[in-house]
């Protein structure tokens, strides 16, 4: 240890951080320089990492391909806004903001002959909690857009909206070709679980009864803990000439969540490794003094790790994820074993030091132990080259 400190001092002297004469003034200068360096370096690193891991807004438009122009409705356009994602119920909440295009809006006939469009979403994709969900035929339109409201300014674009709650797919067996995007995972793979949310929407002209594919001019919305990517989109038609817009949303945990969980797992392993080193030192350095933190920290960490697991962002309830198997469970086992071993080692050594020559009196060995624990005598710490007291304070 002394050689290590000497080598570090030589390196600091070589770089001009430390002088050969270690005076109080030079120590203060070294302290200020190192503190400034650590503060600036950590700030730049963490700010750069935060900018990289920041949750991005959903961007994209649809469709990007269609069979024929007759399948596309050029009368209306939509803005899709992601509101919430629930991986437990496998659902995604979307707000849709419809509006008539400027060339299709005829305000001169808004009162006598208004333009009406109805929006439909297949029942198979909707969750039972979605507004407008009903098993009773015929299908009920989720929203009816009337040109009268837009022409007369009764509603603004911000309030002309409807909401859908649709399902997400978390099994690769339910998709025809999931390899086009990525492999689909479940909550077991937290925080690397991924999902696909298939969307289908069509707009109907009540005058003709035909269904067409609307145009989604923009995807927006930021859902905390998740990243949404607009995947394949297609305007599909049937033999009768009806069109429908199909969009796949690719959903995965954000980089911030993944980075936080991975960093937590690494620090847990580092803490458990340090406690293993403490236990090994207690076996190697036999004539050692016992410090209170050798028991307080491992025992307290057992309760801290449990609360950390419960407070991870978006962590699923229950136990059995990949994170649990490779981080939480082994770390808890290591910490429990270290606490048990340290207590047992200390107990056995205390018992071996106590010899009773007379039941009513202390022996010489016992008296020396009592004096050692009663007075803060200076002893040599096994990991330091300077004297320290019994409780670890210099």
Image: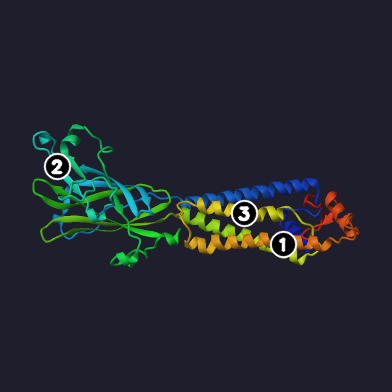
Residues under numbered marks 1 and 2 in contact, where contact means CB atoms less than 8 Å apart? no
SS type, badge 3: helix
SS type, badge 1: helix
The residue that disc 2 covers is 116
Using a 10 Å C-alpha cutoff, classify the residue at mark 3 as few (fewer than 14 neighbours), some (14 to 19) or many (20 or more): some
**Whether residue 147 is visible:** yes
Using a 10 Å C-alpha cutoff, classify the residue at mark 1 as few (fewer than 14 neighbours), some (14 to 19) or many (20 or more): few
Q: Choose top left, top right, bottom left or bottom right for residue 146.
A: top left
Q: Which mark is residue 282?
A: none
Rounded to the nearest angstrom, the CA distance separating label 1 from label 2 is 80 Å
Left or right: 11 as drawn, with respect to 83: right
Up-down relation of residue 173 to residue 80 (above or below): below
Image quarter of the N terminus:
bottom right
Q: Which mark is residue 344?
A: 1
User: Does label 1 or label 2 sit earlier along the sequence?
Assistant: 2
Which of discs 3 and 1 lies nearer the camera? The answer is 1
Q: Which mark is residue 301?
A: 3
In-front residue for pair 70/210:
210
Give percent across and percent down for residue 294. 71, 56
In-front residue for pair 242/62:
242
Give percent across and percent down for residue 361. 90, 55
């Amino acid at each position: 240890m002394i050689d290590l400190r000497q080598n570090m001092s030589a390196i600091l002297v070589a770089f001009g951080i430390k002088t050969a004469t270690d005076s109080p003034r030079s120590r203060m200068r070294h302290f200020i320089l190192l503190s400034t360096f650590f503060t600036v370096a950590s700030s730049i690193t963490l700010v750069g990492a935060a900018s990289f891991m920041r949750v991005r807004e959903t961007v994209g438009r649809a469709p990007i391909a269609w069979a024929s122009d007759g399948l596309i409705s050029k009368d209306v356009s939509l803005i899709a806004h992601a509101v919430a994602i629930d991986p437990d119920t496998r659902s995604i909440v979307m707000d849709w903001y419809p509006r008539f295009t400027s060339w299709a809006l005829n305000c001169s006939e808004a009162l006598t002959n208004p333009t009406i469009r109805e929006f439909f979403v297949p029942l198979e994709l909707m969750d039972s909690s979605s507004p407008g969900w009903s098993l009773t035929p015929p299908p009920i339109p989720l929203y009816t857009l009337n040109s009268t409201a837009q022409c007369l300014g009764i509603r603004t674009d911000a309030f002309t909206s409807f909401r859908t709650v649709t399902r997400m797919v978390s099994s690769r067996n339910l998709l025809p070709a999931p390899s086009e995007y990525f492999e689909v995972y479940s909550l077991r793979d937290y925080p690397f679980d991924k999902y696909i949310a298939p969307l289908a929407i069509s707009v109907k002209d009540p005058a003709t009864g035909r269904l067409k594919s609307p145009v989604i001019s923009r995807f927006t919305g930021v859902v905390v803990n998740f990243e949404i990517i607009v995947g394949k989109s297609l305007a599909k038609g049937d033999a009768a000439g009806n069109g429908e817009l199909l969009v796949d949303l690719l959903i995965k945990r954000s980089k911030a969540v993944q980075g936080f969980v991975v960093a937590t797992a690494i620090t847990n392993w580092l803490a458990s490794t340090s406690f293993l080193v403490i236990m090994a030192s207690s076996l190697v350095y036999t004539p050692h003094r016992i410090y209170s933190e050798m028991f307080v920290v491992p025992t307290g960490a057992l309760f801290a790790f449990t609360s950390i697991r419960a407070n991870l962002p978006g962590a699923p309830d229950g136990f059995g994820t990949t994170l649990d198997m490779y981080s939480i469970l082994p770390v808890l086992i290591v910490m429990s074993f270290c606490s048990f071993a340290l207590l047992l080692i200390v107990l056995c050594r205390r018992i071996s030091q106590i010899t009773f020559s007379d039941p009513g009196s202390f022996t010489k060995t016992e008296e020396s132990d009592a004096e050692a624990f009663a007075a803060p005598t200076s002893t040599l710490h096994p990991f330091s080259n300077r004297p320290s007291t019994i409780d670890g304070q210099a």
